[in-house]
C-alpha cells in the first residue's frame, strides 16, 4: 500500500480501535463498579495503556520506515544550493548533495532522528556526503542519474512530498542505490515496516544511500563523461516510471534493472510528479499529460548532448502516455535524432487502446521506431484502470488479440507474476532476459529464443510458451 493512504489508514485504526477500546472499558468499569474490584480494573487499564503505547510505537516505526524508503528523510548539505521556485530550467546555484538523514538508522536513535524529518526537521543525525563510500560486504552500489519536474521541497528536502509537487522546470542529479549481491533477478527487497533495527541491512534490502542535485550543465557533462568512459559502447537507457510511484521508487527500480539487464548502458530515469498513492489515479493522469513537454525537452537535450550513440527507452504503465507522445513529437520535428533511439519498450502500457491504435501506433510506424509492447491478461492494475476509465487499455490482452502494425506485441500472460502482475517487465527473469537480448543484439522477436509467433506462419503477435 503506498505510504500516503496507508498512513491515514494507520492513524485511523489507532484512534478508532485503541482509544475507544479504552473508553469502553472505563465506561464498563464505571457501570459495573460493584461487580469488579478496583485492583482488577486498574490492572486492566494499565494493560490497555501499554497496548496503546505499543501500537503507537509500531505505527511510528512503520511511518519512519516509509519515510526512509520514500524520500522524506532527504537532507541538503549547505544552504547555497536551495532551489528557488522561479529558477530557470535546471538552475541550481551549485552542485549539492542530499541523502538520508542519519547514514543508517540504528536502533532508537535512528528512529527518533528520522521522526524529526517526518515533521519537517532536519534531524541531528549524520548525513551521507556522497555515494563514493565503499559498499559493504554483500552489497553493491549503483549510481543512477535522473531528470525530474517534481518540485524540490525545501522543508522535507525531497522531490515531491508536498501536495504541490509539480515544477515548471527540470531538475537533475544522481542517486546512489545499494543492491544486495545475493538476490534473484527481478527481486526488489525493501525493509518491512517492522524492521526497526535492521532496515539498513544492505545485504538484504535495496537502499538509497545518497543523492546529488546538479545543474543542467553539470548533469550533461557528468553523463557524457560516464558514457564516453564506457569500455564497449556509448549507450544509455532511460526509464520512465508509471502511476503511483515516488521519486525513490523510480530510483530503486532503475538501479535494479541496471544490474539485472546488464546491458552496459548508463542508467537514467525520468521522474514525473506522480502522487505515489493508489488513490491518486486522477491526479497522476493529469500529471502524466502535464509532464509531456518537459519529457520531450529532456529527451532532445539528452540525445544532443550526452554523447550516447545508443539510447534505449523503457516506459512502464502510465509513464507510456507522456513518453509515446513526447518521443513521436520530438522525432517528427528532429528526424536527425532518430538513429540514436535504438529500442523502445512499452511495458504494461496504461493507455486507451483506441487512442493508441488510431493515434500513437501509426506515428511510430511511420518513424520506423523499433518498438516492443509487452501486455498481459493477468495484469490486475491494468484491469483496475479499465474499470476506472470504462475503456480498454492497450496493456490488457484479454480477449481476441490483434497485432499492432509497426511494432511487435508480446503476450506475457504465461510468465509467473506477483499478485498484482503489473511489474512483470522488471520482476520476472524471463522478461528481463528477453529485454536484455533485444537491447544487446538488436534482434526482433522472430530471432529471439523463447518466443513463439501466433499464428506461426504469419505472426500477428508473439508469446512466451
Image (tube, rainbow, N blue to C red):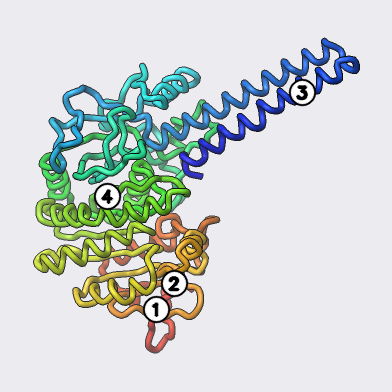
For the residue pair 293 and 464, the one nearer the viewer reads as 293
Q: Are marks 1 and 2 in contact (CB under 8 Å)?
A: yes
> Are the residues at dot 1 and dot 4 in contact (C-beta closer than 8 Å)?
no
The answer to whether residue 177 shows anywhere in this view is: yes
Q: Residues within 10 Å of mark 2 (few under 14, many from 20)?
A: many
In the displayed structure image, the side of residue 297 where residue 17 appears, left or right: right
385 up-or-down from 152: above or below = below
For the view shown, which residue lies furthest in the front direction? Answer: 31
> Residue at the spot x=39%, y=78% of the render?
461
Q: Quadrant of residue 140?
A: top left
Helix, strand or loop at label 2? It is strand
> Left or right: 222 with respect to 122?
left
Disc count in the image?
Answer: 4
Identify the residue under disc 4. 270
In the picture of the structure, the residue carrying the numbered disc 2 is 411
| 260 is higher (above) or lower (below) than 56 | below
| Residue bearing mark 1 | 461
Specify which label sits upstream in the sequence, 4 or 3.
Answer: 3
Give above or below for 277 relative to 326. above
Q: What's the residue at 43%, 32% (across, down)?
A: 67
Disc with the residue nearer the chain's start (1 vs 3): 3
Which numbered disc, 1 or 2, marks the residue that appears first in the sequence?
Answer: 2
Q: Position of residue 63 (x, y in %)?
A: 49, 31
Cα–Cα span, label 1 and label 3: 64 Å
- In front here: 248 or 35? 35
Q: Which residue is at the far right?
A: 35
Amino acid at each position: 500500500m503506498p505510504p500516503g493512504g496507508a498512513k491515514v489508514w494507520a492513524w485511523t485504526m489507532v484512534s478508532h480501535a485503541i482509544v475507544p477500546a479504552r473508553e469502553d472499558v472505563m465506561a464498563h468499569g464505571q457501570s459495573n463498579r460493584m461487580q469488579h474490584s478496583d485492583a482488577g480494573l486498574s490492572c486492566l487499564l494499565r494493560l490497555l495503556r501499554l497496548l496503546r503505547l505499543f501500537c503507537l510505537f509500531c505505527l511510528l516505526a512503520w511511518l519512519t520506515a516509509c519515510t526512509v524508503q520514500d524520500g522524506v528523510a532527504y537532507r541538503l548539505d549547505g544552504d547555497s544550493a536551495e532551489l528557488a521556485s522561479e529558477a530557470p530550467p535546471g538552475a541550481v546555484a551549485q552542485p549539492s548533495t542530499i541523502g538520508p538523514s542519519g547514514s543508517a538508522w540504528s536502533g532508537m536513535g535512528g528512529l527518533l532522528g528520522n521522526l524529526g524529518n517526518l515533521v519537517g526537521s532536519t534531524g541531528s543525525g549524520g548525513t551521507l556526503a556522497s555515494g563514493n563510500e565503499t559498499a559493504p560486504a554483500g552489497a553493491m552500489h549503483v549510481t543512477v542519474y535522473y531528470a525530474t519536474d517534481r518540485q524540490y521541497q525545501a522543508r522535507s528536502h525531497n522531490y515531491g512530498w508536498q501536495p504541490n509537487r509539480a515544477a515548471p522546470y527540470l531538475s537533475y542529479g544522481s542517486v546512489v542505490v545499494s543492491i544486495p549481491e545475493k538476490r534473484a533477478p527481478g527481486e526488489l527487497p525493501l525493509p518491512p515496516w517492522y524492521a526497526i533495527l535492521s532496515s539498513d541491512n544492505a545485504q538484504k534490502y535495496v537502499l538509497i544511500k545518497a543523492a546529488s542535485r546538479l545543474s543542467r550543465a553539470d548533469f550533461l557533462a557528468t553523463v557524457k563523461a560516464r558514457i564516453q568512459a564506457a569500455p564497449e559502447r556509448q549507450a544509455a537507457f532511460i526509464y520512465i516510471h508509471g502511476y503511483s510511484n515516488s521519486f525513490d521508487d523510480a530510483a530503486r527500480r532503475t538501479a535494479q534493472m541496471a544490474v539485472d539487464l546488464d546491458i552496459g548502458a548508463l542508467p537514467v530515469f525520468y521522474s514525473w510528479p506522480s502522487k505515489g498513492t493508489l488513490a491518486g489515479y486522477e491526479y497522476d493522469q493529469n500529471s502524466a499529460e502535464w509532464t509531456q513537454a518537459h519529457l520531450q525537452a529532456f529527451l532532445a537535450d539528452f540525445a544532443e548532448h550526452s554523447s550516447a550513440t545508443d539510447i534505449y527507452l523503457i516506459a512502464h504503465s502510465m509513464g507510456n502516455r507522456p513518453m509515446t507522445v513526447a518521443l513521436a513529437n520530438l522525432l517528427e520535428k528532429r528526424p536527425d535524432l532518430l538513429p540514436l533511439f535504438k529500442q523502445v519498450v512499452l511495458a504494461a502500457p496504461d493507455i486507451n487502446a483506441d487512442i493508441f491504435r488510431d493515434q500513437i501506433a501509426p506515428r511510430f510506424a511511420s518513424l520506423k521506431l523499433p518498438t516492443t509492447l509487452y501486455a498481459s491478461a493477468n495484469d490486475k492494475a491494468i484491469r483496475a484502470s479499465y474499470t476506472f476509465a470504462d475503456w480498454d487499455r492497450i496493456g490488457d490482452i484479454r480477449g481476441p488479440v490483434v497485432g499492432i502494425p509497426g511494432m511487435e506485441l508480446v503476450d506475457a500472460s504465461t510468465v509467473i507474476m506477483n499478485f498484482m502482475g503489473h511489474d512483470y517487465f522488471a520482476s520476472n527473469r524471463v522478461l528481463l532476459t528477453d529485454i536484455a537480448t533485444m537491447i544487446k543484439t538488436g534482434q526482433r522477436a522472430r530471432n529471439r529464443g523463447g518466443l513463439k509467433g501466433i499464428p506461426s506462419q504469419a505472426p500477428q503477435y508473439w508469446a512466451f510458451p
